[in-house]
Image (cartoon, grey):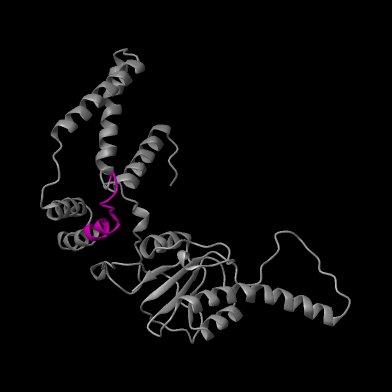
Amino acid sequence: MPIMHPTAALIARQAAAQDEITGDGTTSTVLLTAELLSEAEQLIATRIHPRDIVDGYRAANKLAMEYLEECKIPLPKDEDTFIMNIARTSLNTKVHYSLATHLADIVVKAVKTIRNVEAKDDLVLDLHMVEVMHMRHGSVNDTRFVDGLVLDHGVRHPNMAKRAENVHVFVCNVNLEYEKSLTTTTMMYHSPEERQKLVHSERNFTNEKVQRIIDLKNRIVKSDTESFLVVNQGGIDPISLDMFQKAGVLAIRRAKRRNMERLSKACGGYPVTVVDDLDSTCLGFAK
C-alpha cells in the first residue's frame, strides 16, 4: 500500500535505507525517528523555531558519534566467535533460535569468503558477491553455504558434459547467434541462389566467431584432464552449441551480468566482447 503522508513516507524510506545498508535495526530506526518527531512537536508548541530544533539534534548527533568512538572496542583475537555472536543476535530477532544458529554460521562463512584481507579497508564488503538462491521443495533448515559460484543456468546441448575438472574459463559477451539489426534493413536479391548466398554469409559470420573460440581452446588445452568452459552473456544458437560440443567445449548462454563479474573475481581472467586476437590472458581457471 503506498504511503501518502510525507512524514510517514520519509520514515519508510529511512527504514528501507537502514535495511539495505546494515540489514538490521529497522524497528529501532522507526521508533527513534518517531520519538524525535514527537519531541520536536512539543518544542514547536512552545514556540521554538524548527531551525533551532534541527541545530540541537545535529549537536546531539555529534556528541553521540563522539561517544561511540570512545566506546568502540577492537575485534578480539577470537574474531570468528565474536562475529558469530553478532550474527546470531541479529538473526534471533527474526527467526527461531535453532535456525538463527544454523544461519549465523552460513552468514559468517559467506562474509569471510568475500572479505579481502589484503585491502586497505578490509571491512568494506561488496555484498553483491553473495547470492541467495531459493530452491523449490526445500525448507529453511536445508539452507547451506557453497564455497564457490553456483550458476542458475546449465548447458543447453544434450550431449555436453555435466561435470568438468581443471577448467579453463572463457567469459564473454558475444552474440553467437543470428543478430537482429538495430535499424530496419532490406536485403535485395534477384534469384534463389543469391538469397542462399546471403543466408550462408550470415551463418559463416557466426561460425567464424565460434571457430576462433574453439581455436583458442585447442591452443590452451593440452591433455584430456583439462576442460574448456564458455560462459556467454549473450545467446548461443543450436548450430553454435553443436560446434562447441563436437570440439569438446562446454558452453553456457545468457549468463547474468552479475555472474560475469563473480566469475572474473573467483576464477581470474576478464570478460571479452570481441573474439579477434584471443590469447590465454583472458582466461580464468577452476579446479
Q: Residue at x 24, y 23 (%)?
A: 60
For residue 230, side relative to residue 46 (left or right)? right
Q: Position of residue 12 (x, y in %)?
A: 37, 40
Compared with residue 151, is residue 108 higher up or lower down, i.e. above or below? above
- Residue 190: image quadrant is bottom right
Count of marks, rendered view: 0
Location of the C terminus by quadrant is: bottom left
Magenta range is: 108-121
Query: x, y percentage for residue 40?
Result: 29, 22
Percent coordinates x, y for residue 141 in the rendering = 23, 68
Q: Residue lying furthest right in this view? A: 190
Quarter location, residue 54:
top left
| Residue 110 located within the stretch drawn in magenta | yes
Q: Is residue 203 left or right of residue 85?
A: right
Classify residue 4 as left or right of residue 25: right
Is residue 60 or residue 67 the one in the foreground?
A: 67
* 282 over 85 or under it: above or below: below
**Left or right, residue 118 beside residue 67:** right
- Residue found at x 15% / y 37%: 72
Q: Residue at x 59, y 80 (%)?
A: 238
| 106 and 115: which is toward the camera | 115
Q: Is residue 208 magenta?
A: no
Q: Position of residue 263 (x, y in %)?
A: 41, 64
